[in-house]
Image (cartoon, rainbow, N blue to C red):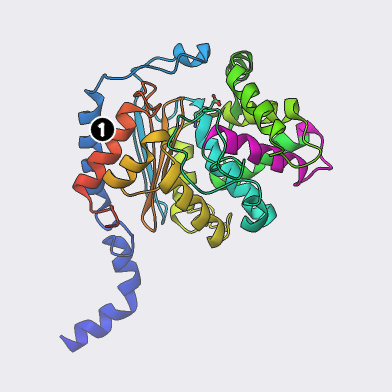
Amino acid sequence: QEKLKKIIQPHMDILDKFFGRHFVVADFKSFTKDIEEIYWKCKGNTAGKNASYIPQLARVNPNYWGVSVCTIDGQRFSIGDTTIPFTIQSVCKPLNYAVALEHLSPIVVHQYVGQEPSGRIFNELVLDHNKQPHNPMINSGAILICSLLQTLIRSEMNLAEKFDFMQNWFSRMAGGERFGFNNSVFLSEREAADRNYALGFYMRENKVFPERTNLRECLDFYFQMCSQDVTCENMCVIAATLANGGICPMTGEKVFSTQTVRDVLSLMHSCGMYNYSGQFAFNVGLPAKSGVGGGVLLVVPNVAGFFTWSPPLDECGNSVRGIQFCEELVKLYNFHPY
Ligand code: DON
């Protein structure tokens, strides 16, 4: 036995890797089988309706359904419509917030925006007791973050360069994938943006923005961020970067500081799922962010990042299948932290 041990010992690393023992999800095959099962279960759920206030979103095929996962050590699995592009919409909010934190620090960012769930619909005309947006995950806070990105960070850049600057950030988070831009959603969104304009004016009246904010340019920038074309396959890598303390599992690059990741995940946990955030935190207990395009980004810290896409939404604006997927996942795996 001792002799055998001596022979095997030097090769343990390779053997461990071969048998999957070094991976965070050791039995990835059975993990993917479980995901597949949940996928098919959710596929049968045809409740909900596409977002209709942006005409281009109302036209997307409601049957699209995709799930992608990337573990923090780069094991990947996808099922369904995971390579079809759709617009990121509000899932860009935590990512824009992360970029603002990286450049300005949480102290500066939170001089302008709070950390409290609003308990109201995402585009409600409401500010908190300080006359500031409640948090960066709802429209008021996300528009404010866009104004910080435009005026306090890289103010020397022109509008095109600022867009490129953000796309480069997204690309690093996604392991080098470059996102597209959906011009028709952008135009449709801008055309239907009365509420966001109203919010912008209301915030300007209350002196929420930093000096030099050009409201029209700020809102355009916000619509541009929401109109980026993404897929489940590239978004799950972003989720995994957040799950991995800011290190992209595909490139090994440290994209975000651990402090940034902590701040972003904390607010995703409390405010990421519109006015369903409290119930989602109760049922699932994990940081997530949804968008009206039907995407849900779900982070299982230190394990994996998930991204699901299905356009029909419930009355809060969350993807029906996306929510069901997250709830089924924590029934099967004890990812709920409590
Ligand atoms: O502001 C809007 O209406 C959209 N572009 C983003 C909406 C969205 O996904 C809702 N998020 N909180």
* Residue that badge 1 annotates: 39
The residue sitting at the left extreme is: 1
Please tell me in which quadrant of the rendered image residue 328 appears: top left
Q: Quadrant of the C terminus?
A: bottom left
- Residue 124 seen in this snapshot: yes
Q: Position of residue 7 (x, y in %)?
A: 27, 81
Q: What stretch is highlighted in magenta?
A: 138-160
2 or 129: nearer the viewer: 129
The residue sitting at the front extreme is: 129
The verdict on residue 151 being magenta is yes
Residue beneath the point at 38% across and 40% down: 277
Q: Position of residue 155 (x, y in %)?
A: 81, 43
Q: Is residue 264 placed above or below 124 in the rendered structure?
A: below
Q: Is residue 51 placed above or below 277 in the rendered structure?
A: above
Dominant secondary-structure state across the stretch colored magenta: helix
- Residue 178 seen in this snapshot: no
| Residue 285 shown left or right of residue 86 in the figure | left
234 or 278: nearer the viewer: 278
Q: Quadrant of the N terminus?
A: bottom left
Residue beneath the point at 29% across and 67% down: 15
- Find numbered disc 1 in the image and state the secondary structure of the residue it sits on: helix
The residue sitting at the bottom extreme is: 2
150 or 252: nearer the viewer: 150
- Amino acid type, callout 1: Tyr
The verdict on residue 131 being magenta is no
Q: Position of residue 49 (x, y in %)?
A: 36, 16
For the residue carrying disc 1, how many other residues have a C-alpha within 10 Å: few (<14), some (14-19), or many (20+)?
Answer: many
Please tell me in which quadrant of the rendered image residue 284 appears: top left
Please tell me in which quadrant of the rendered image residue 302 appears: bottom left
Q: Position of residue 3 (x, y in %)?
A: 20, 87
